[in-house]
Amino acid sequence: MTTILDWSRPHGKLKPFGYTAITVYLALLICVGIVVQYATVKILLSPHFRMKKLTPYLLNIVLANSIVILGSFPTTFAAAVNNGWPFSEFVCRLNGLLTAVGCIAMLLTMTCITWKIYVTASTTNVNNFIAPSAFRRYHIHVIIAIWLFSACVVLPPTVGWSNMRLESASLNCVPDWAPETLNDVIYILLMTVLGYFLPVILSVVLLFRTRTVLRNHTKVLKCLIIPNIRLKALLHVYRMQFLSVICFTLTWLPYVVYVFVSLAYGSMYIFGPALTTLPALVAKSSVVLNPVIYAIVIPRFRESFVRFFWCPSRSNVLPVTAIQMNAFVVNKEVANKKTYQIPAVNQPYLD
């Protein structure tokens, strides 16, 4: 069996400018990724978000992103600085294992979030919306199952079924996308189906079915104020998840195409070092996109995100939205004499 460090098989080299550009890009990605993940954890653990139903799963996505950032980016950064892989075979295998487990766990967690949104939208009477739930045991069971499944999908190359190889330009370690035996081909097909296509297809189907359910809710409750506020929270979460799934799918799609072309032609180096490295870098950028999507779609998350960077001393103050103000009638003369606390609307997700 050919080992990952068999230099007789051509790996290809980038020009010095290419390695320099990748070094700068990875340094930026590491810094931004660490700061953004830390900010997301702080916001999700704040009093307003910590009891929300989706918070355990969003924290699990942060964990998966952090594993990719801390377990994969530093070695790729060092390889770019060195203009080639400077580490041992063990580090190569560990690098490929952490990257694959983190990415698969992130995608599976997004699929679970999509499923929860669909189930809630299709089984809940929005006029009598469910209250926020604590971090119950079934959340832990689902999260543990996600990580066990991700590990089982990725472990075979570390125990002899298929192998880990250096990609072109010698910056990343990945499963051998151009295996020489039928058993190894079967593993690559299973890995891509279980780790990418199946979760993506399930997520897309559930998103479209959820859209139909939410559209029916909107038609029924369009004339009511308070239920519309609650429905709006669910719509925000749906849009957040829709954008998250689409961004992850699109950022990883070029790399998946590269994998299947390598599998079909029997070579991982058919495109050359530059065209091979670019899809991998685009795919890895997905780890910093989720918090940005949360901030764009979820108003409360956006406000907390802005306060985290620009006004940390007021991070615990939650502004009253215009919708909440309109939901309550306050006598103007009495309001000038007393201070009223506007009750929060029961929104169990993120809004």
Image: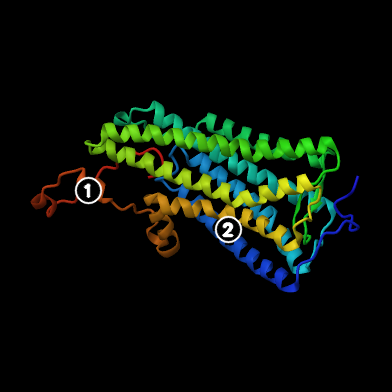
Q: Residues within 10 Å of mark 2 (few under 14, many from 20)?
A: many
Q: Position of residue 32 (x, y in %)?
A: 56, 62
Please say if 219 is above or below 166.
above
Q: What label does residue 325 carry, if any?
A: 1
Q: Quadrant of residue 106?
A: top right
Secondary structure at numbered mark 2: helix
* Quarter placement of the N terminus: top right
- Looking at this view, is 38 or 112 the one in front? 112
Would you place residue 35 above or below residue 226 in this image? Answer: below
| Amino acid, disc 2 | Gly
Residue at 19% across, 51% down = 339
**Residue in view at x 58 percent, y 30 percent:** 141
Relative image position of residue 240 (x, y in whole percent):
45, 46
Hey, which residue is sitting farthest front in the picture? 265
Q: Is residue 64 visible?
A: yes
Q: Is residue 26 above or below residue 329?
A: below
Disc ID at residue 313? none
Query: Which quadrant is the C terminus positioned in?
Result: top left
Residue 14, image x and y in percent? 76, 67
Q: Nearer the viewer, residue 153 or 311?
A: 153
Residue wearing tag 2: 33
Contact check, label 1 and label 2, Cβ < 8 Å: no
Q: Please report the residue visible at 69 percent of the width from the left and 46 percent of the height from the top.
A: 100
Instruction: Pick out the residue farthest to the bottom.
Output: 17
Q: Earlier in the sequence, mark 1 or mark 2?
A: 2
Q: Secondary structure at mark 1?
A: helix
- Going by the numbered disc 1, the residue's amino acid type is Met
Residue 17 location (% of width, % of height): 71, 73
Around disc 1, counting alpha carbons within 10 Å, would you say few (fewer than 14), some (14 to 19), or many (20 or more)?
few
